[in-house]
Amino acid sequence: MKVFHYALLFLIFFLAVIIKTDISIGKLKAIENERTELTRKLTAATSDAVEYLATSGVYGANSIKRDELIDRFFTSLYASMGIISDANAQAELEMYIPVILLCDYDGYYLYYYDTFTAEDGSTYSKRTWSEKMPYYYKDDYFIYRFTLSDMIYLYDINNLLVLPEEVIEADSHEFQKDDRYELFKLQHAEHFLFDDEKFKLTKKEAIINQLEKVLSHYTSRHNAIARQNGISYSFSFPSGFEDEWAGYMDDLNMLVVFQGYPYGADRDYTFNKIASAGGNIIKKPLYFVEKKGWYYLAHIKGCPELEDSTTLLEETFDSIEACARIGAYSDDCIEYGARLPVLVTD
Ligand SMILES: [Zn+2]
């Protein structure tokens, strides 16, 4: 062969490499696009559900209409995935969502697959809601129940506060100035109850640790169930997840674990994502005040009683304290505040 032939061979070889690289770059790009799209759809469905919660009043009277929230989430997800009228595809997709977490003001719910054995002895799995579980924490002094706001419940198991009540319900700031806690404060000035920053940090870590444990448990449990259905994958939280999620922790929020979803042209890639979205319900509550004969009654936005009321004040309030300043009592839709005195008549 002449030099010219070698040059030609080299050119052919070189072009082949370029074309092959180009094809695999194209394939990677397609995979990347699909992953971005999946993330977008999942995040949009999660935000959609939480937004619905914030605006529709399903968060009324201290009880979340959880099934409406879930319906909203799945409807939104099915629509964006183009499977709104394909029940089989929906059932398959759902298998990749082992658990949904809903963090309410004073505790959380899990939406998960539970297994049960039918009369004929066969085992089935079915979606179900857990009971509301408290944000629980314990140290050498007390058992604590946190809320997403500054309200806290203390179980004084060792009677350290020497108070008649066994459970103390208080705004965390009260601990720093209320005389009733003075003795304990003198002995334990370093305790997190007496420092805003420490309080926030302890609460955040306690809640996140607890939820992580519980999510791991329910996801592993689901994986055991899913393996029987021929789907197999393992679970882990992505790095940086804790920080992202912590951003939502001071308000009502929802978290969706999406795991092991096969995608790509040959469905040989696996999509894992934890989508979370937070509401704007606790952070910026809105209160309405109703004039009821001789007194004022405050309601939180979304309370069903607001719908029929014709005596609402035009002014709205952003805290219970602001309602209290005009002398309003709190309706049952509000967690705390002064209640209307019960008039006893014989
Ligand atoms: Zn109300």
Image: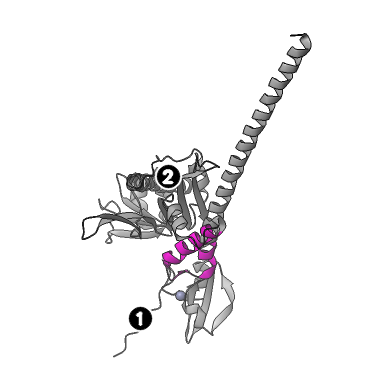
> Circle 1 — which element?
loop
User: Residue 203 appears at what percent x and percent y?
Assistant: 42, 48
Estimate the spatial distance between the alpha carbons at disc 1 and disc 2, rounded to whole Å.
41 Å
Question: Does mark 2 have its CB less than 8 Å from ligand 1?
Answer: no
Q: Residue furthest bottom?
A: 346
User: Residue 85 appears at what percent x and percent y?
Assistant: 50, 63
Q: Is residue 199 left or right of residue 8?
A: left
- In the depicted structure, whether residue 20 falls above or below residue 132: above
Question: Where does the magenta region start and end?
Answer: 50-79
Q: Can residue 283 be spotted in the picture?
A: no
- Which of the two residues, 75 or 8, is positioned nearer the viewer here? 8
What amino acid is at disc 1?
Val
Q: Is residue 117 left or right of residue 25?
A: left
> Tag on residue 205?
2
Q: Quadrant of the C terminus?
A: bottom left
- In the depicted structure, whether residue 320 falls above or below residue 244: below
Name the residue tied to disc 1: 342
Q: Kindly identify the residue that appears in the image at 56 percent across and 53 percent down.
A: 41
Q: Is residue 314 left or right of residue 103?
A: right
Judge whether residue 111 is colored magenta: no
- Which of the two residues, 285 or 190, is positioned nearer the viewer here? 285
Judge whether residue 71 is colored magenta: yes
